[in-house]
Amino acid sequence: MVQAYILIQTEVGKAAAVAGHISGITGVTLAEDVTGPYDVIVRAEARNVDELGKLVVAQIQAVDGITRTLTCPIVHI
């Protein structure tokens, strides 16, 4: 199982709607709108890195109002 935080920048005023939409996507365990340089932070999980990439590119980045994403895989050192 691969887990990651996905940091999202949105169009002005769209953070809450984006977080709400993303929270319903399979593989997303948490989606919250926040303040700071990013507007939404998502925690997601997938079976492997390829599936995580597909989740981000095909489903999360397709949500209306998103301008940029940054995926941060979780590592256990």
Image (tube, grey):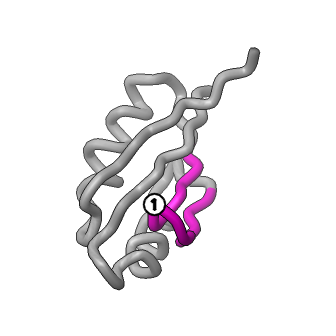
Locate residue 14, reporting x and y percent.
35, 79
Locate residue 25, reporting x and y percent.
45, 59
In the image as oriented, which residue stretches furthest toward the right? 77
31, 51: nearer the viewer: 31
Q: Secondary structure at mark 1?
A: loop
Q: Amino acid at mark 1?
A: Tyr
The N terminus, quarter of image: top right
- Give the total number of marks visible in the rendering: 1
In the image as oriented, which residue stretches furthest toward the bottom? 13
20, 34: nearer the viewer: 34
46, 37: nearer the viewer: 37
The part of the chain drawn in magenta is 30-44
Q: Is residue 49 left or right of residue 61?
A: right
In the image as oriented, which residue stretches furthest toward the front? 36
Q: Is residue 15 left or right of residue 32?
A: left
Residue at label 1?
38
48, 65: nearer the viewer: 65
Write the residue at 38% across / 42% down.
Answer: 55
In the rendered view, tell whether residue 22 sits above or below residue 68: below
